[in-house]
Image (cartoon, rainbow, N blue to C red):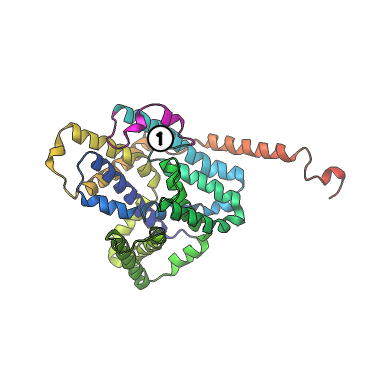
Amino acid sequence: MRRLPALDVTRGLAIVLVVLHHAVLHLDAAHLLAPWWRAVNGELVLLRMPLFFCVSGLLAATAATRSWAVLVRSRLVPLLWVFVLWSLVRFALFRAVTPRFQPWEADSLVPLLLAPVRPTTGLWYLYALAVFTVAARALGRRAPWLLVPAAVLSVAAGELWVRAPFYVWHQMARCFVFFLLGWCLRAQLLRLLGSVRVGPAAVCSVAGAGLLVAHGAGWLRGPGVAGALSVVAVVCGLAFAVLLTRLPGASGLVRVCGWLGRRTLPVYLVHELVVGVGTSAVVALGVAGAGRPGWLPVVWAVLAVLVSLGVHAGAVRAGAGWLYSAPAVLGERAGAALEAVGARAVRPGGDGRRARGTP
């Protein structure tokens, strides 16, 4: 099936929200943030990662038909490669320039060594994506059965009725249902995105924005309301992406968002380094006394995106594309090793019938 432009636009919008989120956090830690940004950022938590994981699940759902060896080679090794490699890069850079936000990341080697089981950095999305993909693939056709339990877990985590010992595990508990929604409802979502018209998409987009504003104003509160609003926000976020692709005057924005949506990994890996180091530099230079302009997070986010893409382009030209993509031989060896393990597991007794001469 041809990839819908709305999917790339959605990913582009989602990565911008992620970059903006980290810009807000780092500027806030440096006392450079206009106070109203905290409220805006607090409401966007209902949309940002749920939307990202929903689209990620939708795009990853093709892995349901792949063998484990192919899945390891084509998806899991690349994810874990960049997760481990860029965890080392972050540790080294933040060791030299400790950011005001999350200074613990470079305090010692302990967080780095525990990253495979307890990631504590902004790279946790990659870790969660690998775990979610394995879980959904292992469930197979039973994956839809887990939608309701995953939704209950998401609400319980969002309402703090259950608390994971670590932030990343807590976020994974909240977001797994959105990955599953994309994974299990891939065909339905693709049909919806391909058929919805401008009018309904516009109404849905406006309604979603209105609900987030109402929630931020305190008009929509109660047990489970935030979880329900996240589902609505994801649907409305997808509708907004479709709306952009259908509006004649938005073709330029669509091209930019779609282009960015196909390059989310380079932005995701580098942007917080840019934000963290840049904010530390501003504080060190004494520019912090210039005030807290409301436009600063937006400028910081745009700068982080541009620098991240520039770093990626420079790395590729310099022959360092391995910073963003695992060497092919690594995936091939991992896949071959898994196939060998599987072959040894079935070799001694086969299926139990051929050893006895039965067909």
Relative depth, front residue between 246 and 51: 51
Residue most extreme to the bottom: 199
Q: Is residue 306 visible?
A: no
Q: Position of residue 92 (x, y in %)?
A: 36, 28
Q: Residue at x 29, y 48 (%)?
A: 20
Badge 1 local density, few (<14 within 10 Å), some, or many (20+)? some
Relative depth, front residue between 6 and 151: 151
Q: Residue at x 61, y 45 (%)?
A: 68
Placement of 97 over or under 166, stated as above or below: above
Left or right relative to 228: residue 345 = right
Say what amino acid the circle numbered 1 marks.
Trp
Q: Residue at x 28, y 43 (%)?
A: 25
- The image shows a total of numbered marks equal to 1
Residue most extreme to the left: 290
Which residue is denoted by mark 1 in the rendering? 86
Q: Residue at x 31, y 55 (%)?
A: 43
Q: Position of residue 244 (x, y in %)?
A: 33, 63
Residue most extreme to the right: 357
Our reading of the magenta stretch's main secondary structure is loop
> Which quarter of the picture shows residue 352?
top right
- Answer whether residue 113 is magenta in the image: yes
Q: Position of residue 153 (x, y in %)?
A: 48, 53
Relative depth, front residue between 84 and 148: 148
Circle 1 sits in a helix, a strand or a loop, which is it?
helix
Look at the image and give the residue range highlighted in magenta: 97-117
> Which quarter of the picture shows residue 26?
top left
Relative depth, front residue between 90 and 219: 219
Q: Position of residue 132 (x, y in %)?
A: 51, 48
